[in-house]
Image (tube, rainbow, N blue to C red):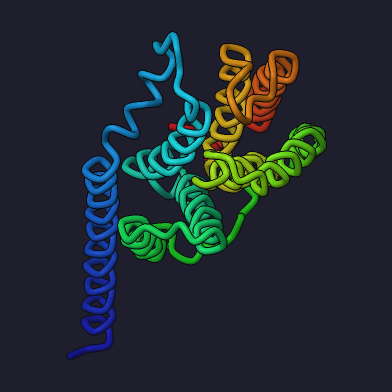
Amino acid sequence: MTADTTQKRSMELLREAGGLRRVAFYVTIVTILALMTAFLGDTLAFIFTAWTVSEPGVHHLHDLALVTILWTVVFGLLVQLYEPERRVAGIQQAVLVNIVITGSNFLTGFIFPSALILGGLLLVDFALHPAGWDVLRVRTAGSVSPVLVGLVVLAGIPFTIYAADQYALQASGDVHAQLDHYADMVTYSLLVLLLGLLASVKPVGWRIPLWSAAGFVGVLGVTSILHPALASSAGPIWGGLAIIWAAGLIVAGEVSHRRSGDTLTELS
């Protein structure tokens, strides 16, 4: 066998391995999404039905927060189904949320076998990502946006105060504390800032965490305005400011995206 033949055969094997890896990547994503639908179908649907409830239950806002977190994972995975190399931030977002939630569950003692299974599959999918080693980096697709960083730092002030208040309420022993709902809102606040920072450094596909961070804040803001008496509500004033901030984050991100003209920052 000549050197040229050996080299060609090696290249063919590499292409075949890459093709199998991509297939395994997609199969794993579909499996995760199918299991999430099976385990959490009714819960996921709440993001659509919650806004039609005229008299919400006492856990309405907390349930919405949980569903928003879950949809952040779903969103990050769904966008991987088309040209995943251009949307690396989506899988980074999903893994980031999974790590934070898993850590929170271990700290509070609320550990669910189904969550561990899904988390394990998500890590497998992360390792199979077609972007290869680049998926391990928060690779900058453009210059870091000082405007986005500034908006995240600005949000960090009220959200730190809010998280501290929720942490204090966790010691109250009421029905929400017994279910660790206040602790969940601390995690929710942390994820807002982490997703915002991830978008600010502009990894490939950075508009995915940008819209997710805005969605987190928007859900809290709208719910706080509609139902100010609910536990963990920020109230109508802070709820309104939250909506303004979320809109400002999206506008700033979209302006930055159009100015940069970077084709690797597509949302979809």
Residue 220 pos. (x, y %): 60, 26
**Is residue 134 something one can see in this rendering?**
no
Q: Residue furthest left?
A: 1
Residue 83 pos. (x, y %): 37, 43
Is 4 placed left or right of 247 in the picture? left
* Quarter containing the N terminus: bottom left
Rendered image quadrant of residue 20: bottom left
Q: Say which residue appears at 66% left-offset and 23% top-offset.
A: 246
As rendered, which of 259 and 35 lies closer to the eye? 35
Q: Residue furthest bottom?
A: 1
Q: Say which residue appears at 66% left-offset and 28% top-offset.
A: 253
Q: Say which residue appears at 74% left-offset and 39% top-offset.
A: 165
The image shows residue 83, relative to residue 216, as above or below, that is below
Rendered image quadrant of residue 10: bottom left
The image shows residue 55, relative to residue 61, as above or below, that is above
The image shows residue 25, relative to residue 219, as above or below, that is below
As rendered, which of 139 and 16 lies closer to the eye? 139
The image shows residue 233, relative to residue 146, as above or below, that is above
As rendered, which of 91 and 11 lies closer to the eye? 91
* Quarter containing the C terminus: top left
**Is residue 30 something one can see in this rendering?**
yes
Residue 11 pos. (x, y %): 28, 73
Residue 245 pos. (x, y %): 71, 22
Q: Say which residue appears at 49% left-offset and 59% top-offset.
A: 102
